[in-house]
Amino acid sequence: MVEAMASDRPTDARPWWQGAVIYQIYPRSFADANGDGIGDLRGIIDRLDHLRGTDASLGVDAIWLSPIFPSPLHDFGYDISDYTDVAPEFGSLADLDALITACHDRGLRLLLDLVPNHTSIEHAWFVESRSSRSNPRRDWYSWADPAPDGGPPNNWRCAFGPPAWTFDETTGQYYLHSFYPEQPDLNYRNPAVADAMHEVMRFWFRRGIDGFRVDAVAHVLKDPLLRDNPPYRRETWMPGFGMRMNQDPLWNMDRPEVHEVVRGLRRVADEFEGRVLIGEIYTPVERLAGYLGEDRADEFQLAFDFELLNTPWDWRLFMLAIERAEALHPPGAWPTYALSNHDNPRTATRYGRERARVAAFLLLMLRGVPVLYQGEEIGMVDAAPSAAGDRAGRDAQRTPMQWDGSSSGGFTAGRPWLPLVDQERVNVAAQAGDSGSLLSLYRRLLQVRAVTPALRCGTHRSVFELAEGVLGWIREAEGDRVLVLCNLTDEPRALDPAPLRRFGTPDRGEVLVATSDRAGHAELRTLVLERLEGVALSA
Ligand code: GLC
Ligand code: CA
């Protein structure tokens, strides 16, 4: 058994995750060590140099693995049939222990994915639950009688659009599922369910993992009266993934009772030292705020703010997402941002390859915890839906990591489970030695973040009206000030010096990092940003 990592800086009161950079690994697609075409834990161990520990590494602080547990793969691992084992295609518990040790040896933390809302239909708990109405585990899931017309008990829809209820012949009742029918929702009104999930957490914490990303947690409790959801009127909830319900999920998402479940998870995390829980909650930031901060110190330490990810390329909307995050995260809370993940089109696909550089710059210079999705650092793009097979509509962004330009991309010695996309051109090996590559830019950004307290943990103040299409902000910590400038337009932009004067910035600043080859000192009063240029200066 391995202990979690001790704090890097014992004298520093800040928890390790504040300002950390997290890297999301989609294990099926990261690296395949045994040639079966499917990524695995040994493959991850073999590739840790990419992430941390050498001069050529990205330098991330933690990795989060999407689910590695046994699963019949109806939702690619998010339907778990055994919470305390490793799926055979990924390896064994011994491999996981080896991965934990290998991570900790290089100062890298490891987070797993906790899926508390639902199990697989094949999980032993559900097999028992559906077997008869009197089974002791019946109440571990949400069962309800048909409506008088024989239809579903109410109008709730699952996150993918269809009804959230499936009829089960054996016992003549419907069971509830917030996602696919193969993912029945657990019933957290039964305290035994929370107890069981807490034991799952302890199992992994004792092995030494540093935390969990907590999946779909806004769904864990629903209205006990099963009231119908009102029709969809406005974007009360987040657009994008999960919002295909075509109704306001008023009664089956983000209910007040969810907070009690979160507090229970947090109590377990706090039984151990230095462990973090990151909530996945698809809600606008004003609702997200209810799970975070000093007043909610017993809930999540972090929770994804997906507003940035949902922002189309429009500088005003970026500004709005950033301002909303800064204004609405309560005191003590620390935003968590991603620009892509396994559920959403990739950044370079949504925004175009050219914009990927300044998008990376923006993400990594903001106050918060950036979560990078594997492949983002080399500008991987989505597969064409037909090429990817498109099982769940999300395969396109889950294609294998491209390590080199060979036909299997260095991902596998066999046949990759999903096709590669333009790997001759987009791969780690090609970008590693090229100082002008996107990968080199990510490395520089991470490096500067790591050694600059203002960027890693400083405050944020936006500087408005610098120029049309230019976002600017000041990060400040320990007397150290950094001015961050992003030109999101396709044209050069001269800055208006007036707003900078109001912030008392000096006339000249030293360039700390830029998306361009700008270096040395810059005259702030006469600065002209290149198209799609990001520059961070000491100021
Ligand atoms: C989360 C996951 C997604 C999954 C869903 C159900 O949103 O990120 O991939 O389908 O939860 O577990
Ligand atoms: Ca494999």
Image (spheres, grey):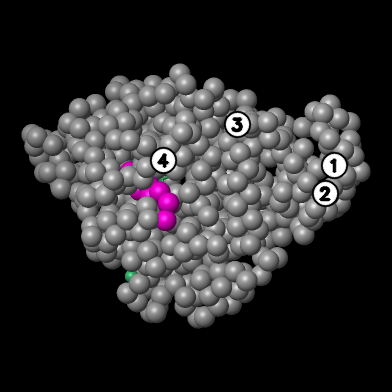
- The quarter of the image holding the C terminus is top right
- Residue 143 drawn at (x, y percent): 22, 34
Where is mark 1, residue-wise? 508
Mark 4 and mark 3 lie on one chain; the one further toward the N terminus is: 4
- Dot 4 and dot 3 residues touching (CB under 8 Å): no
Q: Amino acid at mark 3?
A: Ala
Tag on residue 325?
3
Where is mark 2, residue-wise? 521
Label 1 or label 3, whichever lies nearer to me, is 1
Q: Quadrant of residue 91?
A: bottom left
- Residue 174 drawn at (x, y percent): 24, 38
Query: Which residue is at the front of the view, 8 or 167?
Result: 8
Q: Amino acid at mark 4?
A: Ser
Marks 4/3: CA–CA distance: 28 Å
SS label for mark 2: strand
SS label for mark 4: loop
How many labels, in total?
A: 4
Side of 130 where 364 appears, left or right: right
Question: Image point 8% across, 37% down: which residue?
Answer: 135
